[in-house]
Amino acid sequence: MLTSRQKEALAFAERIKSMGFVVYLAERGDYGFITDDTESRVLSFSFDDGGSLGGNYGPPSIESGTGWRMDKSPCDLKTATDVREALYANPPKFVGRGWRYLTTVKQHLDAYGNSSRYVRI
């Protein structure tokens, strides 16, 4: 039996996939990430905390961490243009200078794939 958060995340993943994007859902079922055919960027989403989106970068640093939380939520991604804009957003200035690159799908899966057990939807 799926929880309400898992149902919400799965419906979101299916909707984003129907727009032409690639979506991975964690085994837990309430979070995952979005990418496109290039797999050059990762847009994380979660329904564990009321619904959030985050950009991802590296390398991990004390100054900048591994990403930033966006001021948009999954419900704000209504069109393919909305998704693309969020996926290709750049880190805001407040994150500092500790990051050097935007995370690719391969890098994200290498770092978190074993613990999250992502499944491509």
Image: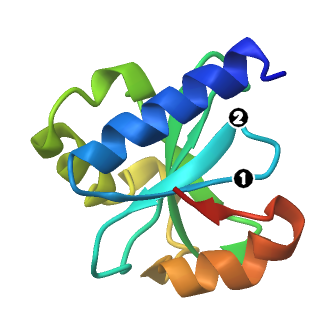
Circle 1 sits on which residue? 26
Side of 109 where 79 appears, left or right: left
Residue 69 place in picture, x, y as percent = 53, 40
Which quadrant holds residue 14?
A: top left
Query: Is residue 99 among what the camera can see?
Result: yes
Q: Residue at x 56, y 34 (%)?
A: 10
Residue 3 place in picture, x, y as percent = 79, 18
Q: Is residue 16 above or below residue 34?
A: above
Mark 1: which amino acid? Ala
Secondary structure at numbered mark 2: loop
The reply to whether the C-beta atoms of the residues labelled 2 and 1 are less than 8 Å apart is yes
**Badge number at residue 30:** 2
Which quadrant holds residue 28?
A: top right
Mark 2: which amino acid? Asp
Could you say which is closer to the camera, residue 35 or residue 54?
Answer: 35
Q: Residue at x 28, y 82 (%)?
A: 38
Secondary structure at numbered mark 1: loop
Q: Farthest residue in the right direction? A: 115
Side of 37 where 120 appears, left or right: right
Residue 85 place in picture, x, y as percent = 19, 49
Q: Is residue 106 above or below residue 93?
A: below
